Image: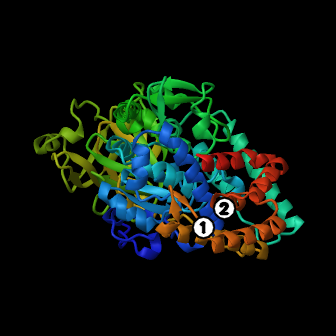
Amino acid sequence: MIEENTPLTPLEGGIIGNELLDRLPPHLRQYIKPQNYEHYTPINQAVWRFVMRKNVDYLSKVAHESYIDGLKLTGISIDNIPSMYGMNRILKEIGWAAVAVDGFIPPNAFMEFQAFKVLVIASDIRQLENIEYTPAPDIIHEGAGHAPIIASPDYAEYLRRFGEIGAKAISSAHDMEMYEAVRELSMLKEKILSPNPSAAIKQAHQAKVDAVEQLVEDLQHKEVIASEISLIRNLHWWTVEYGMVGTVEDPKIYGAGLLSSIGESEWCMKEEVKKIPYTINAAYQDFDITKPQPQLYVTPDFAYLQEVLEEFANTMAVRKGGWRGLNKLIESKQLGTVEISTGLQISGVFTRMIRNEDNEVVYFETQGQTALAYRETEVIGHGVSRHQNGFRSPLGKLRGINLSIENMGPRDLSAYDFYDGKPIEFEFDSGIKVKGMNVTGIRNLKGELMLIQFTDCTMTYKDEVLFTPEDGDFDMAVGKEIISAFAGAADYLSFNLVEHELSTLGDVVDTSEEDKILNGFYSEVRKIREQAANNLSLKKGGNIQLLEKERSQVKFTFNILKDEFPNDWLLPLEMYELIGTSEILEHLRILQDKRPEVKHLIESGLGLLKE
């Protein structure tokens, strides 16, 4: 078995003093990256501030009441990118934690973090040119969208429960292809090229982006049967990401995708966006991540979200089991678990099953490393070291015996010649025959046999030999039927699941001299604003009034900026906020004509200042 890790250090997570994080298993810890707060540039801070000021101003009117309270409760500032340390110190008070993670992580891992009551926050931040939207998860989406709304206890419990159920959802091979493609695309689009890249480097990079974009599009249009993870991902999208609460006539925003997007939080309130009462049908409504959503779902309250989630969970293999559940695992080609009626859990990559005429599973196989568990704890002596080459077993009742092996007491076992250390031969109703030396058995807490060990064993089905003495000892799972099937291992410590390589997204790269100079200007203006904000004598009616020396400094910097960086729009907007000169306003108006793609951003920033 894999040993539990030691507690996270400040270096690993940028976190101190939240015991929830010490409970995280190794396969989740592998996605955690240091936040490296010092890597955020003054431009990054300005991007955060612009988005937050714009959103909070508007969201105070249209978001669920928990949002604004949650910003304060979770330690999220409008003016500064949040630190994991600061967030964890406050989240601890409401029973949650947060970690910085490596951008896109697998859906099941994302859900499992939630089940541990840990918010995963991509520490990277979108570039200025992607200020309205980025395909990659970033701290604006995660920190400003997901974190504040958990101030609502009902919603926080929904999020935890969603993670618990979602972590068990079975994915398909197509899902994993799509995940890898979207992850690669998001990293490519947010990748910062080295300073002054050549035309050939730019061209090669764009060719990669185009190729992966085409792959994502092809995968999106591929007709496949919806997997459990794709259906529950739809529920996640229409609630956690794009959910609304209240009535269809007067909905309020609570979804993180809406809360963190400048444009979509306004767009979603328009009449053109259809508002639909939330039901389980949302699981079957696909979405396009690249476009504004034409419809949104409205839940009457957060408690109702739990009702729909439980309704959906009742359709999942984790609760239904049977041949359909096992078949989902076989088709997924991923590590999964089945639990049989005695409570024995078999974890591995399932490859085959045999069904009888009543569609009952009478035999199954795994390939490669397999582990057995009971109540999510590995059965001693039955980890991957014993079952390196897979596991196979018949299921069901014995022929001519109206009693399952699991229900046999000592007398019954004696009556049917089940003696330890004695040879035995028996046949299942399915026609599977087992012949070998009965060594010993393992019982569950109810006293039922759940595993029998044989040596010198042969197992056959019709004309096929399923197991021979040359295969070694035969461990036969005892159970009438499969009662549950789910993604992942029963005991996550049975397998070495640490295989993720951290990406370089968000890592420090060499910046050009131009970028260094521009960041220097942003830093200068930021310091002036912060110093004035801290000086109560410079505040008047809630606004900052600069001394003449600082005003002159801002004017001087502006004159350099407009000549050396004539296309930059965000810093002039911050300067106008501080000194409000007609020269800066005229420059912003010129930029609106010159750069129509940012015209609405400048206008909304100016509108914010007027308010």
* Amino acid at pointer 2: Ile
Q: Residues within 10 Å of mark 1 (few under 14, many from 20)?
A: many
> Residue at 47% across / 53% down in the picture?
109
Q: Is residue 477 left or right of residue 448?
A: right
Determine the secondary structure under disc 1: loop
Give the mark nearest the N terminus, 2 or 1. Answer: 1
Can you see residue 425?
yes
Determine the secondary structure under disc 2: helix
* Amino acid at pointer 1: Leu
Q: Quadrant of the N terminus?
A: bottom left
Label 2, label 1: how far apart the Cα atoms are? 7 Å
Residue 564 coordinates in the image, percent (x, y): 82, 69
| Residue that numbered label 2 is attached to | 579
> Residue at 57% across / 39% down in the picture?
265
Residue 453 coordinates in the image, percent (x, y): 29, 55
Across the whole image, how many numbered discs are drawn on residues? 2
> Residue at 22% across / 53% down in the picture?
442
> Residue at 39% across / 65% down in the picture?
385
- Contact, mark 2 vs mark 1 (Cβ under 8 Å): yes
Looking at the rendering, which quadrant does residue 604 occupy?
Answer: top right
Q: Between residue 157 and residue 462, name the one nearer to us.
A: 157
Extreme residue in the right direction = 199
Q: Between residue 498 and residue 114, name the one nearer to us.
A: 114
| Residue that numbered label 1 is attached to | 546
Extreme residue in the left direction = 411
